[in-house]
Amino acid sequence: MRVIPAEQITEALKDLAISANYDLGEDVLEALRNGRENEGSPVGREILDQLIENAEIAAKERVPMCQDTGYAAVFVEIGHEVFIEGDLNAAVDEGVRQGYEEGYLRKSIVGDPLRRQNTGDNTPAALAIDFVPGDQVKVTIAPKGGGSENMSMARQYAPAVGRQGVIDFVVNRVKESGSNPCPPVVVGVGIGGTFDLCARLAKKSLLRDLGVRHPDPFYAELELELLEEVNKLGIGPMGLGGNVTALDVHVEYYPCHIASLPVAVNMQCHAARHKTAVL
Amino acid sequence: MSDRKKIQLPLTPEDVESLKAGDRVLLSGPLFVGRDQAHKRLVDLVEEGGELPFDIEGETIYFAGPSPAKPGQVIGSCGPTTSYRMDPYSPTLIALGLRGMIGKGARGEAVVDAMKEHGAVYFTAVGGAAALIARTVISMEVVAYEDLGPEALRRLEVADFPAIVAQDAHGGNQYDEGLKEYARS
């Protein structure tokens, strides 16, 4: 059994929170550059230029690329042969607290949804834990902005709607979201599982680098078809019209009940931020 | 960016009249910054018959909640937030003289009606271009509601703040025009 003190997770998360908000991933930058080449709208091209320049300023000056530094969605994968010494939940929140303070990141969390007092330190994190083979711990943070999160939706269909029903739901969700989620977006799609697991699948799909297809060719093909359909909508950068509405569509699936076909769409703005460390 | 119209804030009625959906502009001058909770407080005040903490006549509000400034910075990253959340509040403020709004995403019918009736214009800034936009901010002060943290009401001086007219005072709507031009079936 390998022992990892919880403080190591705090330390890793602090650095990841800052880096995720300052350094846009090379996969996203590449997708923005490709989008710039394919965009037919002059205003759309100008917006994509600004986003690329913005990412360069943020990385160089060590400032957040977006003022919405997000809800700290944290994913911890724990190897079966690892024992974490200490309180993992507290260690994660402490990492978020330190990262958001030291990195001058915005504190965007209210303590309860109706009375709305800011917690002041961007905690608690939205933590998901998985157990996996091996003797390592993988820690990921994906700061999630509110504008795109608000455009997300889940639906429980009857199995009869099938593949086409899923396509219609996803494309319609992007259409209805319009200019709100900061297009060009990344569309995270969960299919199957239970009501709650389906939404989690959609969120997890956003952790995959842009341009990487689902390993199952059936779902890889679905992703490409969805991307093509979404980019026919004409929404374009910031919703002002154009060919580049989405940078990518990611699908994750899971077994589901014989009665059900759950689908969830988690919208992600172009600041598709996630950083991972392996301990 | 040379073909962008340079606009001096506060906006004049003539500016509002002449700006058309799709116009690319560079804004310079004073801007007030407020988002969800500041808007709620302002409109609650109006409904209770109170006086606003600033003179709104002719002014422009930027829907934003900046990240904290690092030492030596005027302001932290400072991009627009999604505007429809301010739709329940904007008509009241437009009726009191608000002439410009900057945010991102389309506005609803009641806001558009108020813009047409009283003369106001809605600009979009580039969502997520927050580090770039922060460079256009010359000064920042908190005007009210400091307890709201990132949602406090602020006043900025900006120089060449890049924006695009999304919805104008005559019902022109760049979101609709964009879809018409680029949607493929």
Image (cartoon, rainbow, N blue to C red):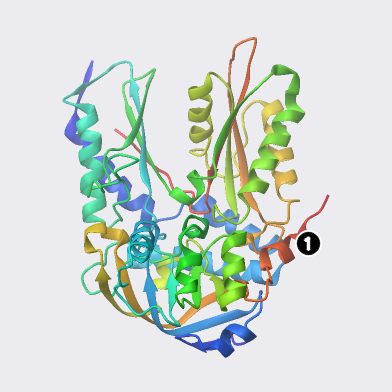
Which residue bears the numbered disc 1?
Answer: B180
Query: Where is residue A12 drawn, in percent x and y?
Result: 26, 41
The amino acid type, in three-letter code, at marker 1 is Lys
Vertical position of residue B111 compared to residue B164: above or below: above
Q: Residue at x 67, y 32 (%)?
A: A220
Of residue B58 and residue A30, the one placed in the foreground of this image is B58
Q: Is residue A2 visible?
A: yes
Q: Is residue A77 left or right of residue B125?
A: left
Q: Is residue B106 visible?
A: no
Query: Where is residue B151 drawn, in percent x and y?
Result: 32, 60
Q: Is residue B183 left or right of residue A26?
A: right
Q: Chain of mark 1?
A: B
Vertical position of residue B167 compared to residue B17: above or below: above
Of residue B42 and residue A244, the one placed in the foreground of this image is B42
Q: In the picture, residue A66 is in which quadrant?
A: bottom left
Q: Residue at x 39, y 66 (%)?
A: B78
Query: Where is residue B1 drawn, in percent x and y?
Result: 58, 82
Query: Where is residue A215 drawn, in percent x and y?
Result: 62, 28
Q: In the picture, residue B150 is in which quadrant?
A: bottom left
Q: Is residue B110 left or right of residue B86?
A: right
**Residue lying furthest top:** A258
Of residue A246 and residue B140, the one placed in the foreground of this image is B140
Q: In the picture, residue A169 is in which quadrant?
A: top right
Local secondary structure at mark 1: helix
Q: Is residue A270 left or right of residue A275?
A: right
